[in-house]
Each structure stands twice: as C-alpha cells, then as structure tokens.
Image (cartoon, rainbow, N blue to C red):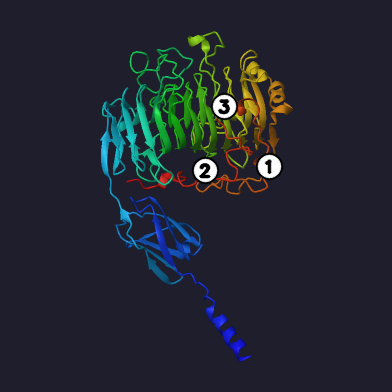
Amino acid sequence: MSLFAALSACENDDKPAPVTEVLAVKSITPASGLAGTKVVITGTKFDPTPANNVVLFNTTPATVTAATATTLETTVPVGATTGLITVTTGGTTVKSATPFTVSDRATVDVTGEIKTNTTWTANNVYVLKGFVYVTAGNTLTIEKGTIIKGAGKEADPKAQGQGGSLIIEAGAKIMAVGTAEQPIVFTSSKEPGQRNYGDWGGVVLIGKAPHNQAGSKGPEGGIRGGTTNAGLGTDNIADDNSGTLQYVRIEFAGIALSNTANSEINGLTLYAVGSGTTIDHVQVSYSGDDSFEWFGGTVNSKYLVAYRGYDDDWDTDWGFTGKVQYALSLRDPEYADQSASNGFESDNFNSGEPATGPNAGLPLTAPVFANVSNLVTSGTPSNATIKGSGGYQAGMHLRRNTSISILNSLFVGYPEGLRLDGTATGTYTNATKGTLDLRGIVLANNTLPVTGKGEITDAQATAYFNTAARKNEVKDLASLLLNTANFTLTAPGLLPQATSPLLTGAVWDGKGADAYFTKETFRGAFGTTDWTKGWTNWDPQNTIYK
C-alpha cells in the first residue's frame, strides 16, 4: 500500500499545470504606414468588445474598430509618431516587441503626357492635374499601397476645366498591382468630410480591341481620340493588352466637364480594351457618373464593387463582349441621376440593327455577367428625386438591340426589376432567340418587377422572364434571408444567412457553360465567402490619405 501511494503521488506530480493565457501582442500587420492605414494587431487575451481595449501608437491613442480575443483592428491616428504599440485591456498593459513606423509621403504633381516608362512609388502621393496621358509604347507602373489624388477643374494647368484624370492611350499600359493589405487608391484631393461625387475625372483605359463604332469616333468627356490622335481605330485585336488593375480603389471620380450630354468621365472607363488586360478586385466609390462603363472591347473581370454611385453601375455599349463574374453594387437610395439610375444599362449607342451603321453595327453588345448583386434599399422603392438630380429606374435597362446576358444575379429595391426596351426585330428578337439571355435572376422589392418598352409589351417581357427553363424568380424580400446588415452602407454585412435560398439554384446552361466562369451554386455575388474583406473601404469620405 505504501508503494501504491508513492506511485500515485508521482503520477499526480507529473501532470502539467494548465496553461493560462496572458495579454500579449504577437504581431502587427502592416509594420508601417501613414495616418489612416488599417492595422491588425494579433495576440492573446484581448477583449472582444472593441471599446474595452486601449491602443496607443507610441503615445497617440487610436480607436479600435473590431476585436476578438486574438485580433484588434484599428487605424493609424492623425499625429501618431514612430514607436511601440501599447495595448491595455482589463487593467493590464503590454507593448509590441517591435516599433510601428509612421511614414510620411512627399507630394508629386503630375500633368501633361507620360512619354517614358515610369514608376510611381508608395513613398509619394501623386496629384493628377488636368488630363494626364500615358502615350503609346509606354508603361506606367504603380506600386502597391500608392495613393493618387485627382484635382478638380480649378487645378487644370491648361485652364480648360478638365478635372484630373489618368488616361492610358491605345498602345500604352498601366501596371497597377496592389494587394488586399495594400491596395492602390485613386481618390479626391479634398480633405476628409469635404469630398463629393465627381471631384475629379477618373481612370480611362483605351485599347485596340473590336467595337462597333467608326474608327474616327473619339472618347467622351473631351478626351482626345479618333484616328488622328491615339484614338480607338479599327485594329480589332481581341486579345490586346492594356496592362493590369488589381486591388485598386477609385473614389469620388466621374466629373461633369460641361452641361453637354455625355461630357462626363466615369469612375473606370474602358474603351476597346482587350482580353489580354487583367482587371480584378476594383472598387469604384461615389462616382459622379457611371461607376464602370465599357465601350466595346473584350476585357474580362472578376470581383468588382460599385459603391454609392450616382448614375448606372454597369454600363455596356459600343459592342462590348467581355465576361464578368462576382460584382456588387451597394447604393445610397437618396442619390440618383437625372438620366434615371439603373443597375445595368446596356445598348449599342446607335438606333440601327445589324447591317446598319459603322462596322455594319457589329459586334453587338453581348457581354456575359454572372453572380452580380445590385442592392438599393430594403424600404419602399422610389423613382423620386431626393438628394440627387433624379431618381432610380431599373435593375436592368436592356435596350437598343443589346445581346447582353446576365446569370445568377440578384436585384433588390429598384422601382423596376427588368425594363426590356426596343424593337420587335432588335432587343425582343435577341431575347427570344437566346442571344440576350437572363437565367437564374432573382428580383425582390420592386414596384414593377418586369416591364416592356418600345415595341415590347409588358406581357411579352413578362413571358420571356418567366420562361421555366430560365429559372428566374420574383421573390418576397424577407424570404431571401439576407444578412440583417446588407443595406448598412458604412458597415455592410454581405453574406446571406445560412439557410438563404440564394445559396442554391444557380443555372449554368447556355452562355454560363463558358470555362471562364466558376460554376458556383449560389445566386448573387456571395456564397459563404466575403471577397470584399480587407481591400475595400466603406467610409472613403472620412479616410485620411497623406
């Protein structure tokens, strides 16, 4: 018995003591940045309530915006200096092992033409004044984390009233490759709280891919072009390469250059851009005109965000035939344009049908979009002018002989869901023969889900939309089980609830069979992964860029 007792005592003594976690800072990502940079602090025993954690950058307090037991999210405060990061939680204080470096960037004004291969670096802030052209044969490379600001009309060095704009001409390239942690940002030159729609011009790419306009046709908004000066031409190089835009934000662009129709520049404008170009993870916010507009071309894209735009979100014309998958539009229901704001506006910018007009009217506008979510409001849809210059119209306004296809997509809160508009031998024939293809569409919270215009009757448009093989639906909004924060503009919750019917039911027949598309099961832009995390900004109005 004595031996047994001794052995038992040894056994108890050999058991390891339980590990008690203590407050600690393990890493800081990124390790340097300027005021306004988002910083993630990882460690242990943080308080999951953000306000219960006190963070200092050297001696300057910062606001914790999100917290878990192992992570704190914050931003570098104004006035911070280089030094250790201090975290205080529950009366205990710890410091980081290494300092956080607060950077300071020089300001570089950019005007006129860029005629040599040029690199813009993250240690500078670049200010666009007037139209800045990257000319044929040259490449502009922009480092990750670089800030580019667009100045207003008053700063145009030629006194022509042109807002700061970056224009990549045909035969030139842009290589703007950011990361989720360090996106490249184009934004207003105005201070936080003073920014507005259309503070500056925007980003314009011009390529050599097919379009259905005359070669002498120049770009809109006063941008130089036509066959005599780096214009669109008739090169018809489908795989033309204008470079790369990855992890890029474009904020407060879309300036109105005059009172003349079509004198605006969009947030991101793509003229005859070819499929050799790479575009993904691009957010356009507060554009004063369309967020994205494609004028012809064949370029493909994934992961696009149109945030609080003014006019249309996705405007396709001049024979655009590219493919897009995963796109989100989140709108402010109080701001819309006098032209009537739509999610999609798709046409050919001419009233002719095939075999008429320049290039015999061909190619027709025939892009394919898949997994798009366009969200305006969970309240009562309205076409009234509230704070903008006009009202909302339709989730999809498809007209002028378009052959667009939209698959597995969601449209919520427009007065009209689908406006099918055109002639019996144009838009309507394209729809009935399947070159204009809508499949797996979900409409919700619309005053009038489907309507016909022009020579297309309401009954014809409705019969087309409701064709059983298309698997389109008009749903009650509550039945979709969206995230309760789906329409919260400054902190949206974008993933559907776990039992949402949107997580199933996708249709990949017809044009959806194309190998470019990932064959998701869900409809709308999101399944169980929020691909906007980390690189988007839901409050650019108050972000400090220095």
The answer to whether residue 312 is visible is no
Using the numbered discs, state the Cα–Cα distance from disc 3 to disc 2 in whole angstroms: 20 Å
Badge 2: residue crowd in 10 Å (few <14, some 14–19, many ≥20): some
Tell which of 18 and 15 is nearer to you. 15
Q: Which residue lies furthest to the bottom in this view?
A: 2
Q: Is mark 2 on a helix, strand or loop?
A: loop
Cβ–Cβ below 8 Å for labels 3 and 1?
no
Q: Position of residue 439 (x, y in %)?
A: 65, 29
Q: What element carries label 1?
A: helix
Q: How many marks?
A: 3
Where is residue 170 shown, x and y percent of the image? 37, 21
Give amino acid for label 2.
Answer: Trp
* Residue in front for this viewpoint, 187 or 388: 187
Task: State the residue at coordinates (38%, 26%).
Answer: 257
Q: Mark 1 points at which residue?
A: 501
Instruction: Using the numbered discs, state the Cα–Cα distance from disc 1 to disc 2 in whole angstroms.
Output: 20 Å
Disc assigned to residue 368: 3
79 versus 456 height, above or below = below
Numbered disc 3: secondary structure:
strand
Please tell me which of labels 3 and 1 falls first in the chain: 3
> In the figure, 76 relative to 2: above or below?
above
Quadrant assignment for the N terminus: bottom right
Q: Is residue 444 left or right of residue 79?
A: right
Label 2 near label 3: C-beta < 8 Å? no
Write down the residue under mark 2. 531
Query: What amino acid type should be assigned to the residue bearing mark 3?
Result: Val
